[in-house]
Amino acid sequence: MKKTNRLPGGKPQGAREVAMNVLHNVETKGAYSGLELNQALQSSDLSRPDAALATELVYGTIKRMNTIDYDLKDRVKGWPGKVEPWVRSLLRMSYYQLRWLTRVPAHAAVDEAVRIAKKRGHAGIGGLVNGVLRGLLREGFEAAIPDGLPAAERISLAHSHPLWLVERWIAEYGEATTEQICAANNEHPHASARVNRLRASRDSVVAGMTDAGMEAIPSPVTQDGIIAMKAGNLVHSDWYKQGFISVQDESSMLVAAVADPKPGMQVLDCCAAPGGKTAHLAEIMRNEGKIIANDVHPHKEALIKQQTERLGLTSVETMVGDALELQERIEAESCDVVLLDAPCSGLGVIRRKPEIKWNKFADDITSLSHLQSRLLSKVQSLVKPGGVLVYSTCTIAAEENEDTISRFLAEHPEYSLDAKWPEEVLAPLRDAGKLPEGFSGMLQLLPHMFGSDGFFIARLRKQSQ
């Protein structure tokens, strides 16, 4: 973790100062952008429009940081390493606003940046900020990326992703698909929710939201999902509070659907927090049977319990422990379905957590793939003969996904991939042309396919005795 730098100037005032403060803490303290932003907004007195502006500035600046830094390095001496962290955050944020938020008058953005610079620093820093930003306005942004760059460098700068990651994706998916992935990662994520089929039908929830003035449509990916536009934060809605919906990405909803547990079964969710997939499994099972929801973090057990209580689910039992040691606490071959939603690099959720692309590296992928293989080898012993093992991640890295499954199958010949996914899952994929030829039972969803998170799902079946 980087050394913490104290931010001068006291409590931030206004949307831009709040955003700068969040960006500073994300960079210098390793804070998560979503958590840091939520805390900052809760402690501020910003209006809804100003809170929206602060949110856009934070996520937009992090998303575009590579492109911003490439341009600023020729305009600011010693950029970025020799510039104070809070000044870096201020200039990056102001650059983003001038280039990509054209609805805000340029003079207002510059004047506010200079005011913050003088308040937080001194007149000299104000002069630096003023000179850099007015120079950008005079000279423009279009020439920031030169022609004739190799494909990986061009994509890295145009779509602001680290070069090593772009090169990796080009090797796995080709140039065109990589550019689609990177472009999709810079789009705004849409709000999606899963309907609790035990309390409401999807049509009734969509109709209710529409009557309330929201734009809500059925998800094209999953029969339990809805997409809501202009709906605000769905966690604050009556539908959420009364247990009719859960906020969840559409790709994530497919995991429990692929597991396809039946009422009365015993199911294990090995890494369950915050409980979205656990709850979905229970809903699919009509709240009949037993689901063991385990997580390694004691404080996250409460999150799972909160989810199940809100949704009226009584079939879930929580457990706290290391998933590598579950075979010591759960009887061997006792579970009809085991779900391992494994710890991963998270490269499929960059759209929601853009700092991931800057704080993850190739070595992280390698070490995580080793952990994932160990987890699979341990929890597989809990699956009944003839039972199902589902492996999922929210990343886009063959080493953590297809390669991990290939290694597992080579070491455990009693398992095989199971392509007999429920038709409710396969049909939308097939209709959209996203089901690969020769589908074997594992699938990599990419963020540009449906505007949902990048996810990998594999369904395996243990041979009957």
Image (cartoon, grey):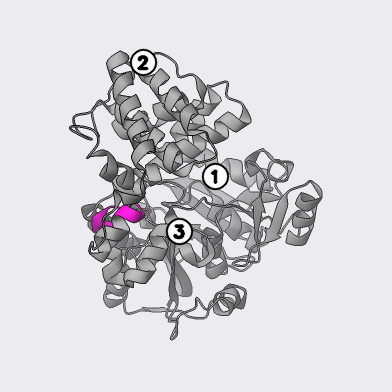
Residue 289 image position (x, y, % from top left): 62, 60
Q: Would you place residue 290 above or below residue 230 in this image? A: below
Residue 122 image position (x, y, % from top left): 31, 13
Q: Residues within 10 Å of mark 3 (few under 14, many from 20)?
A: many
Residue segment shown in magenta: 157-165
Q: Which circle's residue, 3 or 1, is located before the other in the chain?
A: 3
Dots 3 and 1: beta carbons under 8 Å?
Answer: no
62 left or right of 151 in image = right
Identify the residue at horizontal 28%, vertical 52% (top origin). Answer: 162
The image quarter containing residue 174 is bottom left
Q: Would you place residue 1 above or below residue 216 in this image? A: above
Helix, strand or loop for disc 3: helix
Which three-letter amino acid code belongs to the residue tagged 1?
Answer: Ile
Tell me how far mark 1 sits from mark 2, CA to CA: 46 Å
Q: Label 1: which residue?
A: 304
Which three-letter amino acid code belongs to the residue tagged 2?
Answer: Lys
